[in-house]
Amino acid sequence: MSIEFGKALTVTETPIPGLIVLDLPVHGDSRGWFKENWQREKMTAAGIDLPDFGPVQNNISFNDAVGTTRGIHAEPWDKYVSVATGRIFGAWVDLREGPTFGAVYTTELDPSRAIFVPRGVGNSYQTLEADTAYTYLVNDHWSPDATYTFLNLADETAAIEWPIPLDQVEISDKDKEHPRLADVVPMPPKKILVTGANGQLGRALRAEFGEHTWIEYATRDDLDLTSPDLESARRWRDYSTIINAAAYTKVDLAETPEGRVDAWAANVTAVAALARIATANGITLVHVSSDYVFDGTKVGAYTEDDPVSPLGVYGQTKAAADAVVSVVPRHYIVRTSWVIGEGNNFVRTMASLAERGIDPKVVDDQVGRLTFTTDIARGIRHLVERAAAPGVYNLTSAGATTSWFDVARNVFRHGGHDDARVSGVSTDDYFASASGPVAARPRNSELDLSTFEASGFAPAPGDDGLRAYLRS
């Protein structure tokens, strides 16, 4: 067996997205040879984006004879393939849904070369030397319930040029019976789970992402996030992303003894459970935060790095959830303010008052920007599909800040009503006669949007969004 010694650790891209070949340093002398087959720290330093794939199992396939041929199997997990002894001819076929379905790549592997095979890419090999030990790390445990996809080794479309003709080698009967490419059912992408699917944001996410077999929209009736059985409620390794649109948002009721319990359960306990699941299974967790994590005393817009200082129970639960989600390796915290979507909200209330001839008093000393759920959904999709850097992203409508009083007047005016019917009042005076508990509101809710905009996302101007919302 001839091994090339002294290579530098390098990576080579292939025509199949995510399938990469690694040249490994192998050190040899008269006693034999040594290599670091998987070295997380050095791979990270070399810029190889593999060390976080989280292997949980190591398998070895030993092959006695030259020409042993294993079928083209696409599995629902990633695998890192290398050779301990001997040499193979490997063939990989992209069997995932998408534009590269059917793409083929072939190469030889010996102890100085390895390959990373992403989920859904068909993997096969033929031994070129006797006593070949083929070894691979995988990031999920084998399961009979998992979804597999197969391709016939002799498929005419893939047209793999096997070094040893297939009629002269050892192949299992099962591998001989696998379908041709035209009959292969592509492996679907990992699933996306949207919780809180019946809420304002959940409905907007459904409209944005659409109906697909690989997107699951769950209500509380479908999936109780506070259940002690949550970790066994799904085969979580089949999910790539959880978008948590479920939340307790009754800011005043959260100040009551019962509301406080409910707010912490929904906004923190449930989020912590999702964070544990996301961390354990390599899932991206998308969490929606709020301007209520701030006390509103800052002059100017709040950035993602400003320290939190919530005034009430609701804000405290959102700030606690932010801290929990921030330790998930793959996470997006989307911080919003003044959310408007399908359902009961401030804009709908003002439009109804205008139509019924009621002249409202609206607080004029709280400033910020509206955030339409359509923009939030669009922004979340942008982060997920672009695989943006994990972290906190402020997201509201663009444009100048306004007060609730200004928003109310705009609603009246855009609806063809006299905006002078709306009068301003201070927050203290507005709530002076309240019969129940009132949560303290941040007076300044302006969020700086530069981080999100730098990622390539352009939020719609607030007044344009308001006009479109009223028309719909």
Image: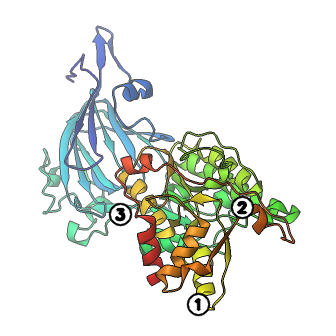
* Res 157 visible: yes
Work out how far the residue at label 3 is from the one at label 1, CA to CA, in angstroms.
Answer: 52 Å
- Sequence-wise, the earlier of marks 3 and 2 is 3
- Sequence-wise, the earlier of marks 2 and 1 is 2
Quadrant occupied by the N terminus: top left
Q: How many marks?
A: 3
Residue contact at pointers 3 and 2, CB within 8 angstroms: no
Extreme-top residue of the structure: 30
Residue under label 3? 187
The amino acid pointed to by label 2 is Ala
Regarding mark 1 in the picture, which secondary structure is present there?
helix
Between label 3 and label 2, give the one nearer the viewer.
2
Residue under label 2? 266
Q: Which of the 4 image quadrants contains residue 308?
A: top right
The amino acid pointed to by label 1 is Glu
Residue 302 image position (x, y, % from top left)? 56, 46
Q: Is residue 107 left or right of residue 377?
A: left
- Sequence-wise, the earlier of marks 3 and 1 is 3
* Res 141 visible: no
Residue under label 1? 355
Residue 292 image position (x, y, % from top left)? 66, 54
Q: Is residue 160 left or right of residue 244?
A: left
In this rendered view, identify the residue nearer to me: 393 or 96: 393
In this rendered view, identify the residue nearer to me: 220 or 236: 220
Residue 217 in the image: above or below residue 244 = below
* Residue drawn at 69 percent across, 65 percent down: 249
Residue 362 image position (x, y, % from top left)? 66, 71
Work out how far the residue at label 2 is from the one at label 1, CA to CA, in angstroms.
Answer: 36 Å
Between label 3 and label 1, give the one nearer the viewer.
1
In this rendered view, identify the residue nearer to me: 407 or 51: 407
